[in-house]
Image (tube, helix red, strand yellow):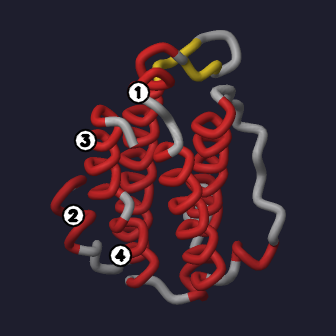
């Protein structure tokens, strides 16, 4: 892995475990929680996985869109399935980034459908997506009356 991405990816690796802490604080039945006029907790958890699928595609192919959709309906009701899905994509993103050369990072951009982001910038945007997700999860925890996992509260509250 090139030096720039090595530093940047270390930061991303601080963000990712919070997703697991969120799953640790839930039960499968919590996934169906849905406040009036808002998405269910399951929908929020599926959405971040679908976003990650788009970022994975971008890091692999230098072209990204967000058409990737969850095709396993069991993920909507199973924390174990969600965890496995996330962990698999985390490993795939790391592998895609590890394969990039210094030249890729310095000279190639990721086509985001009408505009281009540098590889490093795209990784930072992915980190911001995680912050948006953690904020949505925090709101859901509060609406459910559940305690927010400490790791999420420290970054978001």
Of the numbered discs 3 and 4, the one sitting upstream in the chain is: 3
Q: CA distance from mark 3 to mark 4?
A: 23 Å
Q: Is residue 150 left or right of residue 96?
A: left
- Check disc 2 and report the residue beneath it: 153
Q: Residues within 10 Å of mark 2 (few under 14, many from 20)?
A: some
Of the numbered discs 2 and 3, the one sitting upstream in the chain is: 3
Q: Residue at x 60, y 11 (%)?
A: 115
Above/below status of 30 relative to 5: below
Q: CA distance from mark 2 to mark 1?
A: 36 Å
Of the numbered discs 4 and 2, the one sitting upstream in the chain is: 4
Residue 145 appears in which quarter of the rendering? bottom left
Of the numbered discs 3 and 1, the one sitting upstream in the chain is: 3
Count numbered badges in the picture.
4
Numbered badge on residue 21: 4
Of the numbered discs 2 and 1, the one sitting upstream in the chain is: 1
**Where residue 12 sits in the image (x, y, percent)?**
34, 49
User: Could you say whether the residue bearing mark 1 is in a helix, strand or loop?
Assistant: helix
Of the numbered discs 1 and 4, the one sitting upstream in the chain is: 4
Above/below status of 25 relative to 11: below
Looking at the rendered image, the disc whose residue lies closer to the viewer, 1 or 4, is 1
Looking at the rendered image, the disc whose residue lies closer to the viewer, 3 or 1, is 1
Label 4 near label 3: C-beta < 8 Å?
no
**Where residue 155 sits in the image (x, y, percent)?**
20, 55
Q: CA distance from mark 2 to mark 3?
A: 24 Å
Above/below status of 61 relative to 116: below
- Check disc 1 and report the residue beneath it: 102
Above/below status of 70 relative to 117: below
Q: CA distance from mark 3 to mark 1?
A: 13 Å
């Amino acid at each position: 892995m090139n030096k720039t991405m090595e530093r940047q990816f270390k930061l991303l690796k601080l963000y990712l475990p919070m997703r697991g802490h969120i799953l640790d604080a839930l039960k499968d039945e919590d996934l169906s929680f849905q406040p009036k006029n808002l998405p269910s907790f399951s929908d929020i958890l599926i959405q971040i996985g679908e976003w990650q699928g788009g970022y994975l595609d971008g890091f692999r192919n230098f072209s990204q869109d967000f058409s990737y959709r969850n095709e396993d309906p069991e993920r909507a009701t199973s924390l174990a399935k969600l965890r496995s899905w996330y962990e698999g994509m985390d490993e795939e993103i790391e592998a895609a980034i590890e394969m990039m050369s210094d030249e890729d990072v310095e000279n190639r951009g990721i086509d985001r459908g009408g505009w281009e982001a540098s590889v490093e910038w795209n990784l930072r945007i992915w980190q911001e997506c995680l912050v948006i997700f953690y904020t949505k999860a925090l709101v859901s925890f509060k609406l459910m009356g559940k305690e927010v996992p400490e790791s999420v509260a420290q970054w978001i509250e």
